[in-house]
Image (cartoon, coloured by chain):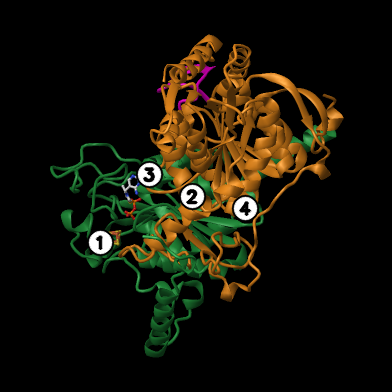
Amino acid sequence: MSPASRNGVLSGEFFMLGDIACAEGAICAGCRFFAGYPITPATEVAQRMSERLPLVGGIYIQMEDEMASMNAVLGASWAGVKAMTATSGPGFSLMMENLGLGVMMETPCVLVNVQRGGPSTGLPTLVGQGDMMQARWGSHGDYAIIALSPSSPQELFDLTIHAFNLSETYRAPVLVMTDAEVGHMTEKVVIPPVEEIEVIGRRKPTVPPEEYLPYRVEPGELVPPMAVAGEGYRIHTTGLTHDERGYPATADDTAQWPLVQRLVDKIEKNKDKIIMLEEDGLDDAEVAVVSYGIAARTAIWPVQMARQEGIRVGMLRLVTVWPFPDEEIRDLAGRVEGIVVPEINLGQIVREVERCAAGRTEVLSVPHPGGGIHDPQAVLRAIRRAAGRKAEA
Amino acid sequence: MELKTDGYRLDRTLETHAEAEGLRGEIHGRHPMDDLLRTDRLPHIWCPGCGLGTALTCFLSALLRSGLDLDKVAVVSGIGCTGRVAGYVRLDSFHTTHGRAIPFATGLKLGNPELKVVVFSGDGDLVTIGGNHFIHAARRNMDMTVICVNNFNYGMTGGQAGATTPVGGITTTSPYGNYEYPFSISALAAASGAVYVARWTVLHARRLERSIVEALLKPGFSLVEVIAPCPTGFGRRNRLRQGLDAMHYYHEHGVIQHGADPVKTDIELEGPVIEGKFVDGEKPTFLEQYRRQLDRLRGA
Ligand SMILES: Cc1ncc(C[n+]2csc(CCOP(=O)(O)OP(=O)(O)O)c2C)c(N)n1
Ligand code: SF4
């Protein structure tokens, strides 16, 4: 890439590392603040941001740890800047408390987890998808979250932009749950001209400061407009349960009900707008493979092989993993004889599939503890088994 | 329970508050500092004899004297009794998580360099759980004023020992006397690179206020350590039963030593409380350094 093209947002065709595509996606989305702490396999996102942000008028800061990184991101968002951090398992764990703060304060921001094998320090350089349930439930208390799962560097680029748009629309932290395989894969990435990229910003209050209640929604709305520091609104926000003024309301459950319910509903009730799925060959399918991220990509070959063997198998790829597509899986479970769920963990999202299938069809997990991608034969065997059960019946 | 969409609104509570606010105005009239306070949140939660009221008053009058544009001042607190300050000031204010006020403030400042960012929090919050952020913000000379109220214990959670509790101090988790060596907050800041460091007890309110003004107007990382009574958590277990006892103690033991070597400012259970302005220097801030490097790149 020529140095000249670095002055501003890139466009064109590139042979690009996933992590770098992620950083470029963020810059295209208008991200101008990155706070992070180095960790394999997410480090290249930080490195790229440290190189690029100063040149586009943004700020990169390497914090002292991931708790600090997450908080700095929240602070920057409250200063009105689109902000992001990127990490992997150990850092993701450290971010959990303050991810919750972001949820509670309704702070738009993006958190990228380039997953590696765990638990603990695990397999620093090797792939895993073991943080999918942590993504959903990792911070304490009740909340809903949006998490996206890309399968290629191109999609990591696209979904990072989309993550910013979702975070600004719903005033919530959005997770990009990629993995070491996609993050460290180099592939063709097409960056469209900047005017062709849809970029959404947060809704601002239209009332003067004396009339503004930072956490009031109008009837029929779920996301309050957001004033930030320095605009004269003199806002207050807290991680405590709060009323519509943003003031603590902790004596009883009066404020807890409407607040927490709304935090969940603003995502759950907009599922149809948030959820993105990719279907292939499901129309006539007797067996469905349901997967996400790199595991979905490695399942393409076994699906093709099974089709050649005469098994009518299709694929449903979860581009959005959270909120979970309950209805789509329920519907699918009513149409097929078996669902096969390959994922690089010992069975996390398969539990969601089982919950939605509710016994209407056989659900087969194809686990992998992390450290590598699936042996395509293992997925193929599971597809055959799912189809075979039907033959026996 | 299925909530209807208008079930997300809490109008009734707010009306009750507005009513109470009007009533308060009728009974008490307005105080000159009311414009800087979220009076609809008063009375505050602090105990009688607590030093936090004085610390807050000194901060607000310093703010007025500083001449700063109040629409561009943001206050960030962590969690604790002191952390409640963010909720009482009528400024852009953020009540974050325990220990994390400084990194949040860092993001705020870097997101909008026009802001004057003030961190107002407790000793446990800032130098025990949040100690790493404290030293790193000072090291970076991050542009912010940190007002750290040191009451030698965790007030909010019921008077436990922390990294500032003097050796021998009785707390609810050091019932036989604390046996750990404490930090001197001022020494920690000075050693980490703070460009302004001062310490005052709340008895020395005028001097405290003056130091806060200086700190607010000083570019870079400034620290004002405020020694304050916590009769409920610490005082009553350590022979300073009431707030007033602590004030007498500060009167008898306070030793003003401007320019004192910060390393020699340890506070023991009994003995002098060295106070004054310990550091007043100058060096480029984080943002100045950042821009300097960029200009160098552009020049090359
Ligand atoms: C992660 C976390 N751990 C523990 C607590 C409980 N907690 C709340 S306030 C506090 C101590 C506050 O002490 P300090 O900062 O000295 O402030 P003070 O109350 O004395 O003003 C603790 C331990 C918490 N809120 N979060
Ligand atoms: S517990 Fe201590 S610090 Fe907290 S309000 Fe009471 S006296 Fe003040």
Which chain letter matches label 1?
Answer: B
Neighbours of disc 2 within 10 Å: few (<14), some (14-19), many (20+): many
| Magenta residues, start to end | A115-130
Horizontal side of residue A159 vs A359, given as left or right: right
Colour of chain B in the rendered structure image: green
Which sits earlier in the primary sequence, circle 4 or circle 3?
A: 3
User: Looking at the rendering, which quadrant does residue A11 occupy?
Assistant: top right
Say which residue appears at 48% left-offset and 35% top-offset: A334
Which of pointers 1 and 2 indicates the residue nearer the eye? 2
Say which residue appears at 46% left-offset and 42% top-offset: B134
> Where residue B282 appears, x then y in whole percent?
61, 46
Which sits earlier in the primary sequence, circle 2 or circle 4?
A: 2
User: Looking at the rendering, which quadrant does residue A179 occupy?
Assistant: top right
Horizontal side of residue A17 vs B272, given as left or right: right
| Mark 4–mark 1 distance (CA, rounded to whole Å) | 52 Å
Q: Provide the residue designation for mark 4.
A: A169
Q: Provide the residue designation for mark 1.
A: B246
Colour of chain A in the rendered structure image: orange
User: Looking at the rendering, which quadrant does residue B180 occupy?
Assistant: top left
Q: Provide the residue designation for mark 3.
A: A140
